[in-house]
Amino acid sequence: MKEFQYFKPKYLKSEPDQARDIISLFGYQLYRRPLEGGELNRLTGMAESELEAGRPLHEAVQVPLKTMISSPQFLYHAGSPGKLDGYALATRLSYFLWKSIPDKELFELAANGRLLDKKVLENQVNRMLDDKKSDRFINDFLDQWLGLGEIDATTPDEKLFPEYDDNLRQAMLGETRLFFRELIDENLSPDHLIDSNFTFLNRRLAEHYGLELEGEQMVKVTLADSSPRGGLMTQASVLKVTSNGVVTSPVKRGNFVLDKLLGTPPSSPPPDIGSIEPDTRGTTTVRETLAAHRNVESCASCHRKIDPPGFALESFDPIGGYRNRYRSTGKGEKTKRQFRGRPIREYREGLVVDASGVTEAGETFKGIREYKKILANQNSLVTKNLLTQLVVYSTGAEVQFVDRENIAEMTQDNLKKSGGVRDLIHAMIQSDLFLNK
């Protein structure tokens, strides 16, 4: 029987030269820059040693390639402290907006030094934001900032919230992602994060919000002036991740508004204070529970800040539906509801929801619409916080004390120019916070 003969390729160059070309090409991609002379010689030497030992070329080059993909230069965004060079800037920019290595155009601009030009950099940011790949940035940024990645951390009680399903879950996330995309694409003011006259819905989510809409595709919808929706706070995804699937907590939601939207997180509670356990039977109001908690002097100062936004959001249940009464597993009137495509479900209507409150400054409100009007005076905090979140996400470093002046200047400049979210991204990328390591 004739022995099978493997095909043996013939190279136009010698095997050592061919290995050097392969290592140089892959090194450019893996290290996001050209290999330096010493690096290339050392890595090529590894392949040459294997070739001398009689191993074929495709096996010989695996040794330096394995070395490269396990090196800090590949695993981390390496670079010298100080001003970023063209390649380091291209890398930081690409991983910020695309979650990937720079493309050919960015590499070319880095190679000839043009990426460091402010106008060229501005054009590249616009190109990257307009590219579909920037959805990776939006999704990942919102997951990190708003905690949307935790949307499956709790499962809504099937008896209390039988309407919740995966179709609704996906629409919830889609609304928030498309909403933030719209702020960037249309360069809308950051104050839309607090309130807006539009959102993105499909039939399923519109039904959840008590609105009528046909079609499964998410579309932009103008909200009525009387609508409690608008802005991030009242989107079902945010309301879902700030509840436990059974009950809502004004403390958790209030803390979310202060920390994630205004950038003014309250102090940590005393270690021995214990937790607040809402009454799932619906026989004790949340306000009664919190009132008892506020009698502790060490808690009162923080609750004066936390409770108002939390109370304003009590009109929304754990899956983001608007409510006038709590759903209960205890006493209450039985209510039957037909959810599309499902059997008739029955649950109990508990106590009446009270979404009124008084802010720490003494401003009163009767519900979420009035509370959002109060927050309209906090535009500088909203803009500053969004800018801070972008800096942390894009650089991987927390904002330090010495950075605060730079943050404040960019914030005031954006407010003075009535700038939008895209303007804020441009300002951040052109700043020393982004251009330096």
Image (spheres, rainbow, N blue to C red):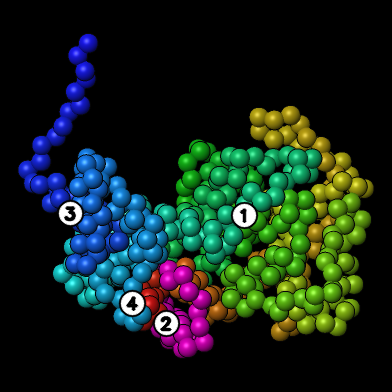
Q: Earlier in the sequence, mark 2 or mark 3?
A: 3
Mark closer to the observer (4, 2): 4
* Residue identifier under label 3: 20
* 433 up-or-down from 8: above or below: below
Q: Residues within 10 Å of mark 2 (few under 14, many from 20)?
A: some
* Residue identifier under label 4: 80
The residues tagged by marks 2 and 3 sit, at their Cα atoms, a distance apart of: 47 Å
The residues tagged by marks 1 and 4 sit, at their Cα atoms, a distance apart of: 35 Å
Who's the residue at 31% across and 80% down the image?
83
Q: Nearer the viewer, residue 31 or 138?
A: 31
Q: Position of residue 355 (x, y in %)?
A: 76, 65
Q: Position of residue 113 (x, y in %)?
A: 18, 72
The residues tagged by marks 2 and 1 sit, at their Cα atoms, a distance apart of: 31 Å
Mark closer to the observer (1, 4): 4
Which three-letter amino acid code belongs to the residue tagged 1? Glu
SS at mark 2 in the image: helix
Task: Confirm or deny contact between disc 2 and disc 1 (CB under 8 A).
Answer: no
* Residue identifier under label 1: 150
Which three-letter amino acid code belongs to the residue tagged 3? Arg
Who's the residue at 51% across and 49% down the image?
174
In the rendered structure, the answer to whether residue 430 lies left or right of residue 345 reads left
Q: Earlier in the sequence, mark 2 or mark 1?
A: 1
Which three-letter amino acid code belongs to the residue tagged 4? Ser
Residue 276 among those drawn in magenta: no
Q: Earlier in the sequence, mark 4 or mark 2?
A: 4
Q: Position of residue 195 (x, y in %)?
A: 56, 66
